[in-house]
């Protein structure tokens, strides 16, 4: 557990009048309550960061990050936002770092067999059993969205809802595979990961957000580990989702994608394969 810090509790009425102060207090409380666990799974050691404490009869919020990052880079801005105050106050949050992607991870030796995305999905039951979480609400981005969707297909009774950002539920076709191989000959791993995270327009615009992610990925001390996760993402199997069929996400799902994002078409297609009475589709600029 992180070192305890003194937190001054402000009058509750004052918090209600000033949401920003309430959000700052929530962030401080989460830092004090933050716990880290290293959990052994059949597919490697998984680092889990818990924020808050479990609430009786409420699901845990479980996050899974995208390639080229850990949970902090992927989710810190979201969960520190003042609009998330009520959520972080009322739910325990469980951030899962894929094996070898966490801050301070050891570099895997050459030839290490990294788990597939299907196998990463099967690390989640180990985490939930260790933490005694009977049900979850999943939040995933990119590769993490795929992992959570795959987990939900296999364990539908444990998932009460999903928020999936930039999900691509399809395996790479032969043309995509060939294009990926050719790109690998002319582009570095950081460049390929950045093109997965951002559109061409965003990269050329070089905003503060893009520069932050670019610096983090270019300077990553575990870039070879990031490469392994990237390869697993590009070797993913088709989820074979089918509206009205046996293979579908049976919980409420929110799909989120950016306008002109690299995965816009894939998310639109995913939306067409899910139950419209259970699915919300949000496209943001």
Image: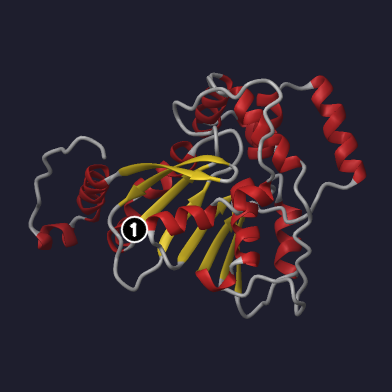
Query: Residue 249: horizontal and vertical position, in percent?
Result: 65, 70
Query: Residue 195: horizontal and vertical position, in percent?
Result: 69, 34
Left or right for 232, reference 28: right
- Which of the 4 image quarters holds residue 210? top right
Between 42 and 91, which is closer to the camera in this rendering?
Answer: 42
Report the residue at 36% width, 70% height from top: 58
Left or right for 181, reference 84: right
In the rendered view, would you say 247 is above or below 205? below
In the rendered view, would you say 255 is above or below 181? below
Q: How is the image coloured?
A: secondary structure
- Which of the 4 image quarters holds residue 154? bottom right
Query: Residue 131: horizontal and vertical position, in percent?
Result: 38, 56
Query: Residue 209: horizontal and vertical position, in percent?
Result: 51, 34
Report the residue at 61% width, 53% height from top: 121
The residue under label 1 is: 92
Viewer can see residue 204: no
Badge 1 density bin: few <14, some 14–19, many ≥20, Cα 10 Å: many
The secondary structure type at the circle numbered 1 is loop
| Quarter of the image where the N terminus is located | top left
- Which of the 4 image quarters holds residue 232? top right
Left or right for 88, reference 261: left
Tally the marks.
1
Between 42 and 21, which is closer to the camera in this rendering?
Answer: 42
């Amino acid at each position: 557990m992180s070192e305890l810090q003194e937190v001054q509790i402000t009058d509750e009425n004052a918090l209600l009048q000033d949401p920003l102060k309430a959000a700052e207090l929530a962030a401080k409380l989460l830092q004090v309550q933050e716990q880290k666990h290293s959990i052994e799974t059949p597919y490697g050691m998984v680092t889990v960061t818990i924020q808050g404490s479990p609430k009786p009869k409420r699901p845990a919020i479980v996050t899974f990050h995208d390639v080229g990052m850990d949970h902090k880079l992927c989710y810190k801005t979201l969960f520190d936002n003042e609009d998330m105050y009520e959520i972080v106050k009322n739910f325990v949050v469980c951030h899962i770092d894929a094996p070898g992607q966490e801050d301070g991870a050891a570099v895997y030796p050459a030839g290490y067999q990294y788990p597939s995305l299907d196998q990463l999905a099967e690390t989640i039951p180990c985490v939930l059993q260790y933490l005694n979480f009977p049900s979850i609400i999943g939040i995933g981005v990119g590769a993490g969205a795929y992992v959570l969707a795959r987990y939900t297909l296999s364990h539908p009774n444990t998932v009460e809802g999903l928020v999936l950002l930039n999900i691509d539920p399809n395996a790479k076709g032969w043309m995509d595979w060939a294009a990926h191989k050719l790109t690998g000959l002319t582009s570095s791993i950081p460049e390929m990961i950045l093109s997965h995270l951002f559109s061409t327009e965003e990269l050329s615009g070089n905003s503060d957000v893009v520069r932050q992610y670019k610096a983090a990925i270019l300077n990553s001390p575990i870039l070879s580990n990031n490469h392994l996760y990237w390869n697993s993402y590009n070797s993913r199997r088709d989820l074979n989702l089918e509206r009205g069929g046996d293979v579908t996400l049976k919980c409420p799902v929110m799909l989120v994608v950016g306008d002109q994002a690299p995965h816009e078409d894939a998310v639109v297609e995913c939306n067409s394969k899910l139950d419209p009475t259970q699915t919300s589709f949000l496209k943001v600029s």
